Amino acid sequence: QVQLQESDPGLVKPSQTLSLTCSVSGGSITSGSYFWSWIRQPAGRGLEWMGHIYYFGSSTYNPFLKSRITISMDTAKNQFSLHLTSVTAADTGMYYCARLVAGTAGWFDPWGQGTLVTVSS
Amino acid sequence: QSVLTQPPSVSGAPGQRVTISCTGGRSNIGALFDIHWYQKLPETAPRLIISGDTHRPSGVPDRFSGSRSGTSASLAITGLQAEDEADYYCQSYDSSLSRWVFGEGTRLTV
C-alpha cells in the first residue's frame, strides 16, 4: 500500500523559504489519476489545503497562498516537494503530505505522519 | 474561520451513540460536493473513515456512518469505545473559494 513520509525542516527563520519533501513508497507518483497534496494545520487552527501537483506535473494552489507557494515533483526519486517563500510566524504548524483521490469531489488518503515546522528567529 | 462549521467538542459514555455535525453553504455541501470524514488520534496522521458521504473504507468499523441533508452532513458513531476518543474533521470542496476545505474539527471525549 502507498505510504507517504515528510522530511523534517526543523526551524525556519522569518522571511526565509520553507522547503519540504514528501517521499512516496508502495506506488509510483506518476501512476493513476492522483493529486499529490500538501495540507497544513497552523498552530491553534484547523486543517488547510495548500495545493497539489497532478501526476503529469501541473500544479494547483490555494488562492490564499498562490503568490508564495510552489509544488514540484521528482519522478526519479518518487517524491514531491513544497516551497513556501517569505514565511512568518503564522506559517508555524504541522505540515502533511497526502494523496488526493478523485479530484474535485475527492478525499485525501493516505496521509504522511506530518512534520512540525517552527518559524522563529 | 473554516467554511465548514463543526462543534468544538462532543462527548458520550462507552456504548452510547454520538453525532458530529458539519454545516456548510451553497458553494460546498449545498452544491452537492461530496463530504468526507477523518479521524485524528494524538501524534498520528489523519485517517479517512468516511468517503463520498457514506462509504466506509476497508478496515473502518461499521459503527461509523455518514449522512447528509441540504447544506449539512453528519458523522454518527454508535457503540462508543475508548479508542474512538480523537479529533474528527469533515472535508469537501468549495466552488466559490476554488479549494478543498475542512471543518475546524470536533474533539470527541469518551
Image: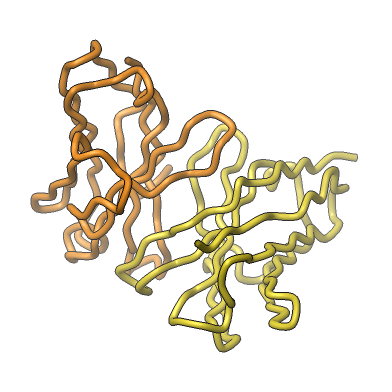
Chain colours: A yellow, B orange
Q: Which of the pair B52/B62 is nearer the observer?
A: B62
**Vertical position of residue A113 compared to residue B7: above or below:** below
Residue at the image point whose x is 64% and y is 49% from the top = A95
Residue B19 position in % (x across, y down): 19, 30
Q: Is residue A80 left or right of residue A97?
A: right
Q: Quadrant of the C terminus of chain A?
A: top right
Residue that extends furthest to the bottom in the rendered view of this protein? A56
**Vertical position of residue A34 compared to residue A22: above or below:** below
Q: Is residue A10 left or right of residue A89?
A: right
**Vertical position of residue A3 compared to residue A13: above or below:** below
Residue A40 position in % (x across, y down): 58, 50
Residue A58 position in % (x across, y down): 57, 85
- Quarter-of-image position of residue B52: bottom left
Q: Which of the pair B64/A35 is nearer the observer?
A: B64
Residue B106 position in % (x across, y down): 36, 31
Residue at the image point whose x is 9% and y is 50% from the top = B69
Residue that extends furthest to the left in the rendered view of this protein? B69
- Quarter-of-image position of residue A11: top right
